[in-house]
Image: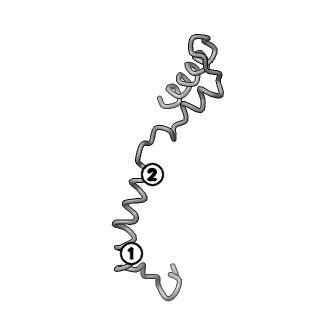
Amino acid sequence: MIRSRSWAASSNSSRFAADPAFRLDAESLAGLLKPERFVGRAPAQVDEFLAEHVRPWLTIHPPSLPDEEAQV
């Protein structure tokens, strides 16, 4: 299903780029449709969560590593 939608989006973007009414070439249209342009604040929210919750927790509870490698 994802592939078919991806193909449809690709097909539509080719048609839009070819349509003179849009006044965008394929490269410009591809730049506008990059998925990373649509993630909103997610990267900043991850950084904030790590800084406010994970790093402070790790300073209080440092990872404990075994003295020797586990042998199975």
Report the side of 38 relative to 27 (left or right).
left
Q: CA distance from mark 2 to mark 1?
A: 21 Å
Residue 18: x and y in percent read 63, 14
Residue 43: image tag: 2
Residue 58: x and y in percent read 39, 75
Protein image colouring: one colour
Above or below — where is 6 with respect to 44?
A: above
Residue drawn at x 61%, y 11% as measured from the top left: 20
Q: Label 1: which residue?
A: 58
Residue 32: x and y in percent read 55, 31
Q: Name the front one of labels 2 and 1.
A: 2
Query: Dot 1: what SS?
Result: helix
Farthest-out residue, front: 23
Query: For the residue carrying disc 1, how many other residues have a C-alpha within 10 Å: few (<14), some (14-19), or many (20+)?
Result: few
Above or below — where is 11 with respect to 21?
A: below
Residue 69: image tag: none
Q: Nearer the viewer, residue 55 or 28?
A: 28
Residue 4: x and y in percent read 52, 25
Residue drawn at x 47%, y 29% as measured from the top left: 1
Report the side of 28 relative to 37 (left or right).
right
Residue drawn at x 49%, y 26% as measured from the top left: 5
Farthest-out residue, bottom: 67
Query: For the residue carrying disc 2, how many other residues have a C-alpha within 10 Å: few (<14), some (14-19), or many (20+)?
Result: few
What amino acid is found at the position of numbered circle 2 in the picture?
Answer: Pro
Q: Nearer the viewer, residue 54 or 69?
A: 54
Query: Dot 2: what SS?
Result: helix
Residue drawn at x 51%, y 78% as measured from the top left: 72
Q: Can you tell which quarter of the image residue 59 is in? A: bottom left
Above or below — where is 42 with respect to 56?
A: above
